[in-house]
Image (spheres, helix red, strand yellow):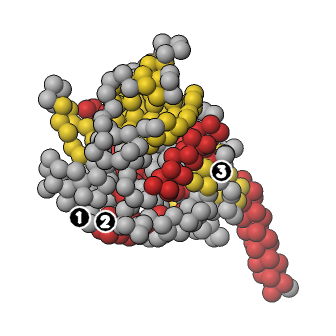
Amino acid sequence: MRTCDACGFENAEPGKPCALCGSSEIVDAASDVSTMVAPATLTPAGGAGTARFEAGHVFGERYRVVSLLGSGGMGQVFRVEDATSGQALALKVLRPLDSDEGDRVRRFQREIQILTRIRHPAVLHILDWGDSPAGLYFVTELVDGEDLKLAIRRRGPWPAPEAAALGATLADALAAAHAQGVVHRDVKPNNVMIARDGSVRLLDFGLARGAGIDLTTLTRTGTIVGTPGYMSPEQFDAHGVDERSDVYSLGVVLFEVLTGRLPFTGQTPIAVALAHKTETPPLPRSLRPGVPAWLERAVLRCLEKDPARRFASAAALAAELRRPREGASPRSRALPSGDGVLLDPAETTDWALVLTSAHEKTGWTEGMTLRFEERYYRLVRAHAPASEGAPWTYRFVSWPEGEIFRRLVDYEQDLASREEAAGKKLSGRLSRWLGRRE
């Protein structure tokens, strides 16, 4: 048995299509590199068993088929030549099936509508579309490169800076889709193309729908809508999904890019779903120690089970992945207040700020926001003294950009108010003592 790279199903048989998602593992003998493709049936709209498309087949009296680039659940993608301009382009044609044709046609038409609305360099732009005896089709630019799944398999885990840059670009593309009210719902490495010039494209909006629309993950025929290894917990529950579902899926992609493996797998579709819903993902740094602490935290936040605990938007995730972290090493110092502080602006350690104090900071609770030297931090852990004479320790991470502050505390103002309260308390004790003396 093997684990399907496309969906995480552990009971896929070697050399055969995955029973869960239909993807096959094919080894290119020339390069000894495996790539995931779905079973290809090069048939026109007349149905299975009719004539195959040959090189030279023309769509729309203009686009001549050169070769098959790939095949998926919705359709097939061909390299074509535009007879008008001579330009090499990509053409996707709806692959006919014997059942559920109406729904597939609607999904294909919706993908065309979505791609004509989204304007972003990392999202393919529709150049043309139409209907032919072979079926519905649309034409886009041709991306010369490889999909991210193959790139991970070829390269192994990526360096953290490259992974963060890739994640930020994909988050930007998702933010552009979300701005149009569109949730992708199938973010995975197979739907990400890396061009030879290093540019990135997010593909396959065939499952995309508006935010808040309920998703039935299992249809009447038992076919999973989406890719289990990358789906958010709420997708399995058929709950309404929003952009935070795409943030979760992108977190799975980042986990895989950084570690070379999926966070959750299972021997059955139910096992995969339960893992996403109930299991804690492995720490990326336990699998690859070189992953920076800040990047691990960002990935794990994407993978929160509760959507409210994830990044509020793809744009917020992109900002976190791009935040400058170079040039400053951790430094510690004593403050005039007597507190001690360790600052790590680059977040190379587990914490952006660690503050120690001889006294408990009453009212400081986990999740609160601390303003310290013009920056904002979230209190994650507060440790009471482990022994007599040991300090209280408060550990913070940087406050995520774009997130609403919760119970904001300014360090200087808090210190001043504590000193004022202490002064009043001392003054009261002195007054009471003098009163007794008289």
Q: Residue under label 1, please give it.
A: 267
In the image, what residue type sits under mark 2? Pro
Q: Residue at x 14, y 50 (%)?
A: 14
Secondary structure of the residue carrying numbered label 1 = loop
| 175 or 318: nearer the viewer | 175
| 210 or 157: nearer the viewer | 210
Q: Quadrant of residue 196?
A: top left
Q: Residue under label 2, please give it.
A: 269
From the top left corner, tell me how far across and down residue 175 is, in percent: 60, 43
The numbered mark at residue 181 is: 3
Q: Quadrant of residue 230?
A: bottom left
Within 10 Å of disc 3 (Cα), the crowding (few <14, some 14-19, many 20+) is some
Secondary structure of the residue carrying numbered label 3 = loop
| 324 or 215: nearer the viewer | 215
- Image quadrant for the C terminus? bottom right
Q: Is residue 10 visible?
A: yes
In the image, what residue type sits under mark 3? Gly
Secondary structure of the residue carrying numbered label 2 = helix
In the image, what residue type sits under mark 1? Gln
Gap in angstroms between the C-alphas marked 3 and 1: 35 Å
Among the two numbered marks 3 and 2 on one chain, the one whose residue lies closer to the N terminus = 3
Look at the numbered discs 1 and 2 and tell me whether their residues touch, using CB distance below 8 Å. no
| 168 or 49: nearer the viewer | 49
From the top left corner, tell me how far across and down residue 372 is, in percent: 65, 49
Q: Is residue 1 above or below residue 255?
A: below
Looking at the rendered structure, the number of numbered marks drawn on it comes to 3
Q: Quadrant of residue 8?
A: bottom left
Q: Residue at x 65, y 50 (%)?
A: 181
